[in-house]
Image (spheres, rainbow, N blue to C red):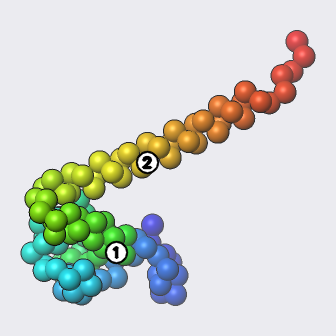
């Protein structure tokens, strides 16, 4: 979700603040690497009015995870798949924990007299 004012955007991890060149520089990689991550559908940068790719801090963190794996010899495609699966597992665990809490709360609530 994008923030409403420029000051709100400072802390918005999803705001597409970084150009491709700046993002590549921050990650110590090349624009081609970022394009490859887009082609593998790991990250989908937003586009500026001029059509240039713009990346958020959240997307840069994902790209950094993939880059670590690629630097260790994993193919880009495999690294992207691993990151996607890790995120899916993390989300499934979060949902599972939430459901356990709900179940525990329902099980411990006082029962109405019948």
Q: Residue at 86% x, 21% y: name it.
A: 112
In front here: 94 or 43? 94
Q: Position of residue 37 (x, y in %)?
A: 17, 65
Do the residues bearing badges 1 and 2 touch, measured as CB atoms within 8 Å?
no
Rendered view: 70 above or below 97: below
Label 2 residue SS: helix
Residue 95 visible from this viewpoint:
yes
Crowd tier of the residue under label 2, counting other residues whose Cα lies within 10 Å: few below 14, some 14–19, many 20 or above:
few
Q: Is residue 113 left or right of residue 5?
A: right
Residue 16's x, y, as percent? 34, 77
Residue 97 vertical placement versus 87 (above, below): above
Can residue 48 be seen here? The reply is no
Question: How many angstroms separate mark 1 from mark 2 (CA)?
Answer: 20 Å
Question: In which quadrant is the N terminus drawn?
Answer: bottom left
Residue for point 13% across, 80% down: 30
> Along the line of sight, which residue is nearer the eye, 93 or 73?
73
At mark 1, the secondary structure is: loop
Estimate the x, y position of residue 23 in percent, counting from the top left.
25, 82
Residue that label 1 marks: 56
Residue 91 relative to residue 34: left or right: right
Residue at 16% across, 69% down: 71
Q: Which mark is residue 91?
A: 2
């Amino acid at each position: 979700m994008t923030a409403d004012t420029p000051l709100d955007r400072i802390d918005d991890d999803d705001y597409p603040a970084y150009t491709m060149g700046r993002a590549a520089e921050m990650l110590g990689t090349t624009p081609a690497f970022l394009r490859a991550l887009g082609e593998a559908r790991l990250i989908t940068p937003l586009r500026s009015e001029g059509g240039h790719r713009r990346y958020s801090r959240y997307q840069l963190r994902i790209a950094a995870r993939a880059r670590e794996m690629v630097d260790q010899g994993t193919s880009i495609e495999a690294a992207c798949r691993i990151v996607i699966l890790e995120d899916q597992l993390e989300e499934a665990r979060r949902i599972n924990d939430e459901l356990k809490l709900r179940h525990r709360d329902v099980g411990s609530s006082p029962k109405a007299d019948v």
